[in-house]
Image (spheres, helix red, strand yellow):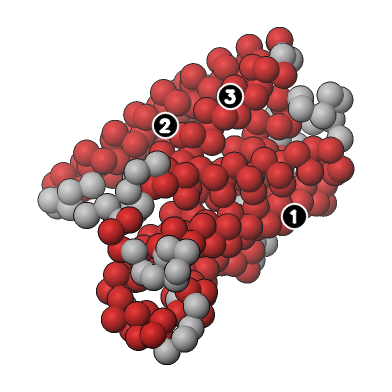
């Protein structure tokens, strides 16, 4: 099996392409060069650091260290997803609406996949658990931020309509049903597009990596299918839970709309 290795010079050539893109942006006053270079620098630092962390975890195999890293990953995913919202819930609810659904869905699906499907020994082996959890969180935070951004941005603009429906006897779930459905639809577009385009428009990352590493194509396809199905389930459950919690928070126990619970 011929393994593809990447040298520092290979990385330098790839980085040069990004620098060229930043130069084009600067020359044409597009305004993306600064965030582009900052994101690229942050990516390099983060990936190098996680490489050293994973190396230490593989050597120690201590479950407590693995759990700490997993919780840090959840917290950072919540932070990144929250930074993309136009509106947020005030107080601790602003963070909980993101971290809570991500924690429940990502951990549940990851543990189920490790225990039932992949079955490493031990079941929490960081070589499998950390990358798998990372994929669940990476896709889940995008889905959750999309659904919450749509929901929390639309409800205030349609306040009069919602309150009229409440006056007509509808409960909070009925009054925001259309908004909730549209929010879920918005959050589901990326993962539906990814599944639709897989194998025709694009070769997903996990499959591409395995093929480049020399794995048999059909074996790579099987593993990619498993990953994409797990990601879809995890992201979908996170969306539904996030919208449910947000709707409950936007209304009080008497089904009155409480926009004062949103940050101004």
Residue appearing at x 51%, y 57% in the figure: 245
In primary-sequence order, the first of circles 1 and 3 is: 3
Residue 89 vs residue 7, the one in the foreground:
89
Residue matched to label 1: 225
Q: Is residue 35 visible?
A: yes
User: Residue 176's x, y, as percent?
Assistant: 45, 76
For the residues marked 1 and 2, what is the alpha-carbon distance in whole angstroms? 27 Å
Disc 2 crowd, CA 10 A, few/some/many (<14, 14-19, 20+): few
User: Residue 82's x, y, as percent?
Assistant: 38, 46
Q: Looking at this view, name the residue that lies furthest to the bottom.
A: 168
Question: Residue 199 occupies which quadrant of the picture?
Answer: bottom right
User: SS of the residue at dot 2?
Assistant: helix
Residue appearing at x 29%, y 70% in the figure: 156
Q: Looking at this view, name the residue that lies furthest to the front.
A: 254
Question: Residue 145 occupies which quadrant of the picture?
Answer: bottom left
Residue 165 vs residue 253, the one in the foreground:
253
Is the Cβ of the residue at disc 1 closer than 8 Å to that at disc 2?
no
From the viewer's perspective, is residue 18 above or below residue 255? above
User: Residue 247's x, y, as percent?
Assistant: 47, 64
Residue matched to label 2: 43
Residue matched to label 3: 69
In primary-sequence order, the first of circles 2 and 3 is: 2
In primary-sequence order, the first of circles 1 and 2 is: 2
User: SS of the residue at dot 3?
Assistant: helix
User: Residue 92's x, y, as percent?
Assistant: 40, 41
């Amino acid at each position: 099996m011929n393994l593809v290795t990447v040298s520092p010079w290979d990385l330098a050539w790839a980085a040069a392409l990004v620098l060229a893109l930043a130069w084009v942006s600067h020359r044409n006053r597009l305004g993306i060069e600064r965030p582009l270079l900052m994101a690229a620098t942050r990516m390099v630092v983060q990936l190098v650091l996680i490489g050293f962390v994973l190396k230490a975890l593989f050597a120690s195999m201590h479950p407590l260290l693995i759990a700490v890293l997993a919780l840090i990953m959840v917290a950072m995913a919540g932070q990144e997803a929250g930074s993309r919202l136009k509106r947020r819930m005030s107080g601790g609810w602003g963070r909980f609406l993101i971290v809570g659904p991500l924690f429940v869905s990502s951990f549940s699906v990851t543990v189920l996949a490790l225990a039932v499907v992949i079955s490493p020994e031990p079941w929490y082996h960081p070589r499998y658990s950390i990358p798998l959890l990372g994929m669940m969180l990476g896709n889940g935070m995008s889905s959750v931020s999309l659904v919450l951004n749509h929901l929390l941005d639309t409800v205030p603009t349609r306040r009069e309509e919602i309150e009229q429906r409440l006056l007509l006897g509808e409960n909070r779930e009925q009054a925001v049903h259309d908004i909730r459905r549209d929010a879920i639809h918005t959050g589901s577009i990326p993962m539906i597009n990814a599944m639709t385009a897989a194998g025709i428009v694009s070769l997903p990352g996990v499959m591409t990596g395995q093929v480049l590493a020399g794995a048999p194509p059909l074996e790579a396809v099987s593993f990619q299918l498993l990953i994409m199905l797990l990601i879809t389930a995890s992201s979908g459950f996170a969306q539904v839970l996030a919208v449910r919690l947000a709707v409950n928070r936007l209304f009080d126990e008497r089904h009155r709309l409480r926009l004062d619970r949103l940050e101004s």
